[in-house]
Image (spheres, rainbow, N blue to C red):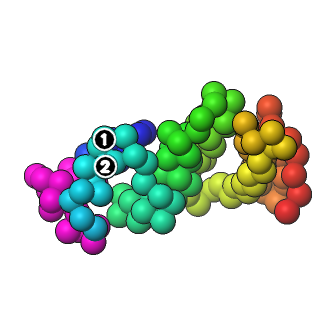
Amino acid sequence: MNTIQYIDKLKKINNLDTDYKLAKLLGCKQQKIKNWRDGQTMDNNTARQFAEMLEIPVWNVIADMEAERAKDEPTRKAWKMLSKMTKQSGRASAKLLISLGVLANSTAVLCILCKITNGRTVRVRGVSNYVV
């Protein structure tokens, strides 16, 4: 999902007909919502707030926002993969470890991702292994 879809979904489940009312619910100014609609993405703290209000895993929203912010396609794909994994595995059954490291040339971000299942760490295809 993208920022606008999250905004519209939150408005719908709260029976809000205007962005002004959503801004009041979120405790922010209406201009902030307008900025999101005009292309800005919400920060991770706001993404957490949206996730809690929508009753979905926080990483779903954060990963979607990071995918929107990504400046290159490999980074965008890595974040979309994380978003897809968190949606498929569900809140209770999945534990995800994420670590982002900026590469030396600062043109790409390496996403390191492991899924923990039944006490076993499984390296996700296409990304590096990392132990926390």
- Residue at the spot 21% in from the left edge and 59% down from the top edge: 30
Q: In this view, does 80 lie above or below 57?
A: above
Answer whether labels 1 and 2 touch (C-beta < 8 Å): yes
Q: In this view, does 65 lie above or below 46?
A: above
Q: In this view, does 34 lie above or below 47?
A: above
- Residue at the spot 72% in from the left edge and 36% down from the top edge: 107
Residue 25 magenta-highlighted: yes
Q: How far apart are marks 1 and 2 (CA)?
A: 5 Å
Q: Is residue 29 left or right of residue 72?
A: left
Q: Identify the residue under disc 2.
A: 35
* Mark 1, other Cα within 10 Å: few <14 / some 14–19 / many ≥20: few
In the rendered image, the residue lying farthest to the top is 73
SS assignment at label 1: loop
SS assignment at label 2: helix
Q: Identify the residue under disc 1.
A: 38
Q: In which quarter of the image is the C terminus?
A: bottom right
Q: Quadrant of residue 125?
A: top right
The amino acid sitting under disc 1 is: Asp
- Residue 4 placement (x, y as % from top left): 32, 42
* Mark 2, other Cα within 10 Å: few <14 / some 14–19 / many ≥20: few
Look at the image and give the residue range highlighted in magenta.
9-27
Does the image show residue 57? no
Q: Quadrant of the N terminus?
A: top left
- Residue at the spot 81% in from the left edge and 43% down from the top edge: 103
Residue 91 magenta-highlighted: no
In the rendered image, the residue lying farthest to the front is 105
- Residue at the spot 74% in from the left edge and 51% down from the top edge: 100
- Residue 63 placement (x, y as % from top left): 56, 47
Q: Nearer the viewer, residue 30 or 97?
A: 30
Does the image show residue 61? yes
The amino acid sitting under disc 2 is: Asn
- Residue 128 placement (x, y as % from top left): 86, 41
